[in-house]
Amino acid sequence: MQLKTTNSFSSQTTREQFIYYIYPKLQDSLVQGWQEFNRSEIANLYSKFFEFILAAGFDESEYRKVIPNPAYDNAAKLIGKYFLEVARKYNIQFDEIFPGSFAASQESQQGDIEIRQFQLQAFVDQKPLCLLLLKFPHLHKKFGFPLPPKLEVIEFY
């Protein structure tokens, strides 16, 4: 199934297709990538790499606010591989490289969990579709993604 692009992207049909059919597949693909990553040996390698970066002083450096931690950045890209496959299947492109612009992202805290939020503008056939919010729960004191990423639609265009 391809998104219908003959009508305006503000049409109810396109929104309904996205919300009821494609959005759940995108969310499920994030959960699938998160589960696969957390069960993999590479998660242990990234954890060791995270400890190495912390020992080198990355977290206390001036770069912490503008450059993503390489262990988390690369892990997020691995978690997002199925998300990108689903997006490609439906001819959806984004304005940023997954998971989004770190410099423009925001972080909040919920208990011991930090949540990095990225905005991604979604396009179909080079026409704007919607603005997405991608939330990546993670830890700061040690490496880990305790909860799966969450996808939300901020607005349709």
Image: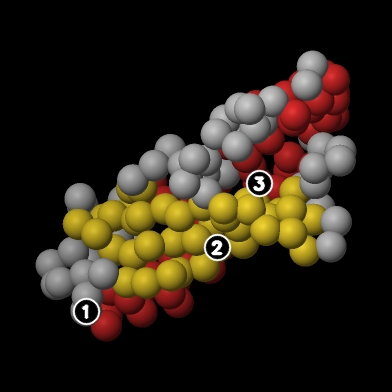
Which residue is identified by label 2? 151
- Badge 2 crowding class, 10 Å Cα cut-off, few under 14, some 14 to 19, many 20 or more, is many
Read off the residue under disc 3: 33
Pick the residue in front: 116 or 82. 116
Which residue type carries mark 1?
A: Ser
Q: Quadrant of the C terminus?
A: bottom left
Estimate the x, y position of residue 56 in percent, counting from the top left. 79, 16
Nearer to us of marks 2 and 1 is 2
Q: Residue at x 63, y 53 (%)?
A: 107
Numbered-mark total: 3
Foreground disc of the pair 3, 2: 2
Of the two numbered discs 3 and 1 on the same chain, state the one appearing first in sequence: 1
Q: Specify the label residue 143 is tagged with.
A: none
Q: What type is the residue that disc 3 sits on?
A: Gly
Can residue 75 be seen in the rendering of this structure?
no
Q: Which residue is mark 1?
A: 11
Report whether 11 appears left or right of 117: left
| Residue in view at x 65 percent, y 32 percent | 64
Q: Is residue 90 left or right of residue 22?
A: left
